[in-house]
Image (tube, rainbow, N blue to C red):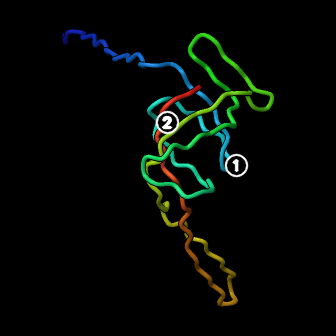
């Protein structure tokens, strides 16, 4: 008779360095950010150079691990500071219009511009 074997699966648990995070609103979207995150955001007006400070003042929620503050709709005097890293364009999105049996086919492409920022502090 074969012997029955048992296997145990070991899982590695990692404890995050900082549990502090915030939810910000920019470019018509909401983003959950923590210190050190790199974020690609759209529709920020202004001219930026590498290393410039970008401040997001529309903060919806801040959680420091023990206390949670929720805004109505925004938290007064709260801001998230970040450093500008680069500007670029996203991957090409194909836009196709097609009508069968009428020989109509139209193709276009679109690349959405973005700004890449690194979150430096949550205040």
* Residue 39 vs residue 44, the one in the foreground: 44
**Which label sits on residue 73?**
none
| Residue 47 placement: quadrant | bottom right
Relative to 82, 6 lies left or right = left
**Which label sits on residue 119?**
2
Residue 87, how many percent across, how many down? 47, 57
Q: Within 10 Å of the Cα at label 2, are there few (<14), some (14-19), or many (20+) other Cα atoms? A: many
Residue 5, how many percent across, how many down? 24, 11
Residue 96, how many percent across, how many down? 61, 75
For image coordinates 60% across by 28% down, the residue present is 22
Q: Within 10 Å of the Cα at label 1, are there few (<14), some (14-19), or many (20+) other Cα atoms? A: few
Q: Please give the residue where the numbered disc 1 appears in the rendered image.
A: 28
Asked if residue 83 is positioned above or below residue 113 in the image, the reply reads above
Circle 1: element type: loop
For image coordinates 50% across by 66% down, the residue present is 92
Relative to 107, 85 lies left or right = left
Name the front one of labels 1 and 2.
2
Quadrant of the drawing holding the N terminus: top left
Q: Earlier in the sequence, mark 1 or mark 2?
A: 1
Circle 2: element type: strand
Asked if residue 43 is positioned above or below residue 35 in the image, the reply reads below
Q: Count of labels shown?
A: 2
Query: Mark 1 and mark 2: span between their CA atoms?
Result: 19 Å
Quadrant of the drawing holding the C terminus: top right
* Residue 109 vs residue 9, the one in the foreground: 109
| Residue 72 placement: quadrant | top right
Asked if residue 24 is positioned above or below residue 123 in the image, the reply reads below
For image coordinates 64% across by 23% down, the residue present is 62
Relative to 77, 96 lies left or right = left
Residue 94, how many percent across, how many down? 55, 70
């Amino acid at each position: 008779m074969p012997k029955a074997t048992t296997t145990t699966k070991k899982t590695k648990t990692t404890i995050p360095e900082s549990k502090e995070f915030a939810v910000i609103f920019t470019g018509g979207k909401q983003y959950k950010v923590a210190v050190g995150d790199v974020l690609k955001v759209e529709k920020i007006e202004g001219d930026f150079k590498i290393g410039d400070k970008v401040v997001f003042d529309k903060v919806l929620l801040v959680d420091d691990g023990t206390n949670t503050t929720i805004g109505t709709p925004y938290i007064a005097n709260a801001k998230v500071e970040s450093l500008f890293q680069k500007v670029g364009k996203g991957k090409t999105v194909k836009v196709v219009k097609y009508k069968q049996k009428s020989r109509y086919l139209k193709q276009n492409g679109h690349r959405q511009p973005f700004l890449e920022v690194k979150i430096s502090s949550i205040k």
